[in-house]
Image (cartoon, rainbow, N blue to C red):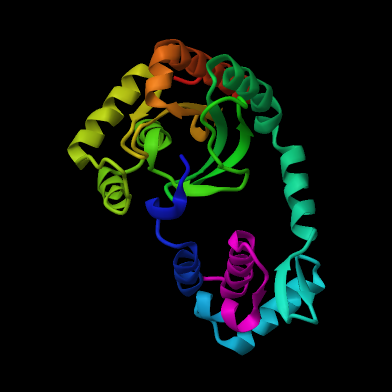
Amino acid sequence: MTDPRKHRPPLDRELAEAVEASKAPAISRAAAVLRLLGKSDAPLGMQAIARELGLVPSTCLYVLRALVAEEFVSFDPDTKRYSLEAGVLTLARHWLRRNRFNDLAQPVLDRISQAFDVTTLGVHIVGLDHIVVVAVSQSGNNFQLSTQIGSRFPALISATGRCIAAFADHPEAELEARFRTLRWDEPHTFDEWKAQVSQTRGQGFAVDAGNYISGVTVVAAPVWKTRAKLSHAMVAIGIGSGLRRNGLPALQDTLLAAAQTLSSQLCGEVSP
């Protein structure tokens, strides 16, 4: 679930392509600027932002000035560089405050993380485009992952991707096209992946035993906001050998039961 350094293309390329394909270019440009500044370790100058996103400098400057006026971006007149402003945090906090999944999932993720010495995540599913980490819990022991709230990953990657393919209604041709773009430490064929998706559908949860990140096991269980909409997943991540010693079957059962309970709380009935 983590380690985006080589498992997806650079974010600036993705953002530039999104801007080019957008039917609402002004909004897309602003969103791309915010995402670029969010992933940058240091403030960026206007020319660097324009270059990374493939924008005309005058257009980039117009977008930046608008974002500064709305307090989403700050500008340092001494360095002539831009960075995120606190306004984006206010929006995020409002969203988290209204998101029932987070309120219900966080204590459960904390308990599972401590009981099995794993990193646990709650992820929001955005169709076949991507998944977004919206809740994180780490045991504080041994192996930890650096995934943070707001991190994005390709939708079909790892165990969560198998859940999306198994329980959401997407055409096989579209799944295969998306699958071909994914990067794995230990790749498998599309037919092998389809067999794992079928197994996921039968058992109710998915396991990635080192395919996405070598030596790391990822378990994911789907969560429904409504019976017709697969909206989230609960995920547990740890070193494969450690999970086998600490009881992988018990972790799988616990995660699945927690996801089913959470689905029941969110939509009033346990999902299939």
Please state which of residues 172 and 233 is positioned toward the viewer in this rendering.
Answer: 233
- Residue 141, quarter of picture: top right
Q: What is the quadrant of residue 159 in the picture?
A: top left
Q: Position of residue 50 (x, y in %)?
A: 57, 80
- Residue 178 at x, y = what percent? 32, 51
Q: State left or right for residue 230 relative to residue 106.
A: left
Say if 118 sits above or below 249 in the image.
Answer: below
- In this orientation, which residue lies closer to the viewer: 245 or 218? 245
Residue 24 among those drawn in magenta: yes
Tell me if residue 3 can be seen: yes
Closer to us: 105 or 209:
209
**Could you tell me residue 217's position as x and y percent?**
39, 28
Count of numbered marks: 0
Q: Which residues are magenta?
A: 23-49
- From the viewer's perspective, tell me whether residue 101 is left or right of residue 183: right
Residue furthest bottom as drawn: 58
* Residue 174 position (above or below residue 109): below
The residue shown at (67%, 83%) is 61
The quadrant the C terminus occupies is top left
Q: Is residue 191 above or below residue 204?
A: below
- 67 sits to left or right of 261: right
Magenta stretch: includes residue 50: no
State the predominant SS element of the stretch in magenta.
Answer: helix
> Viewer-proximal residue, 74 or 170?
74
As drawn, which residue projects farthest toward the front?
Answer: 142
Give the residue displayed 57% in from the left and 41% down from the top: 133
